[in-house]
Image (cartoon, rainbow, N blue to C red):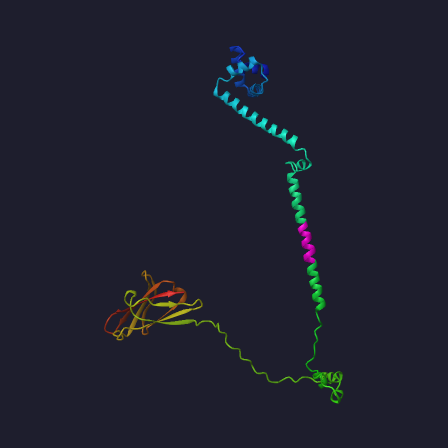
Amino acid sequence: MNLVNDEQSRAYFLGKLPETEAENFEISCASDAEMEAAAQLSERELIDDYLRGNLTEADAALFETNYLITEARARRLAIAESLWRVADERRAKGAAGAVAGGSFWQSIFNRRYRFQLVFSGLALLLLGFGLVFFVFFYSVDRNDVAEVRDKTEPVKIERPGVVRSEADQNPAQTGPAANSAVPVRDSNRAAANVQPKIPTEVKPVSTPKSAGANPPATADFRLAPGMLRDEGEQFINILPNLKNVKLQLTLPKDAAKYEVYRIVLKTADGDEVLAVPATRTLELTIAADKLENRTYLILLDGQNARSDFESVSEYSFRVRR
């Protein structure tokens, strides 16, 4: 494997190679990746020499005539020119900064030490705050505790059986009466031997009922006959702790002739909730947890000994929780 010669490659791009050698050069680069990479490197160096003015007048003319014959090569030249322009600008700025930035502070606050300085400043600031907090608050807390302990006075405890003298009970009293009083030590010693009397009978103490007593387990509601469109909507408020709901149905004036009644509880959508096939009372008891926040209908049918069940009345109500 023969690597591409740099002189041969530059001659190829400048158009100096004969046609036969140029074809062999192209075939070699196409068949070998390393040779192709070496040729591309030589091409970039040739472009850089042209942009920097390192080529002779004859080679520069050949570069413009024989190399810049395709759009791809012209694009490579434009990209290289823009890169060199950016590099020259940065180099010029760096030189100007080196000339003008010779002071001590500018050399310290450059990009190299900027992060270290910022981090060191934050660390010193946090350390200072922690020191101030410890010195101030810790010393204040200890002084406060010491002051409270110093000001605490001992608590005097007196036994309930001690009998104080009249002079002790009335310090302002002076004279013979005060001098004739029994000494406090003697009276205390005498009272210590006296055992308090304990009552033999203890009366029970009645505890008043609290205002927030539990609600009753069953709540009674009376319903009037009629549908929503006729008599208006009836509401039933169910408390959270209520267990059962008892519904008492009020009969119309001409419906007291039946011996047996049939009660059916349904939702407004027609779903049956509870049914009582035969009863002599007009009461319906249902668990409170079966009633939801919606409207319900009650169908009441009656029966005599000589007839079948026939419709008596309808009731409607809405549940609120």
Q: Quadrant of residue 305?
A: bottom left
Q: Is residue 5 visible?
A: no
Let me know if residue 11 is in the magenta part.
no
Q: Quadrant of residue 188?
A: bottom right
Q: Quadrant of residue 277?
A: bottom left
Q: Position of residue 195 (x, y in %)?
A: 69, 84
Seen in the picture, residue 268 relative to 84 is either above or below; the reply is below
Q: Which residues are magenta?
A: 128-138
Decide which of 260, 7 is in the foreground and name it: 7
Q: Position of residue 97 (x, y in %)?
A: 63, 31
Q: Position of residue 235 (x, y in %)?
A: 36, 67
The quarter of the image holding the C terminus is: bottom left
Decide which of 176, 95 is in the foreground and name it: 95
Asked if residue 93 lies left or right of residue 76, the reply is right
Residue at horizontal 66 percent and vertical 51 percent from the top: 129
Decide which of 45, 143 is in the foreground and name it: 143
Residue at horizontal 68 percent and vertical 60 percent from the top: 141
Residue at horizontal 48 percent and vertical 19 percent from the top: 70
Q: Is residue 124 visible?
A: yes
Asked if residue 177 lies left or right of residue 115, the reply is right
Count the numbered circles shown: 0
Residue at horizontal 53 percent and vertical 10 percent from the top: 18
Decide which of 135, 274 is in the foreground and name it: 135
What secondary structure prevails in the magenta region? helix
Q: Position of residue 221 (x, y in %)?
A: 36, 71
The quarter of the image holding the N terminus is: top right
Seen in the picture, residue 188 relative to 28 is either above or below; the reply is below
Let me know if residue 137 is in the magenta part.
yes
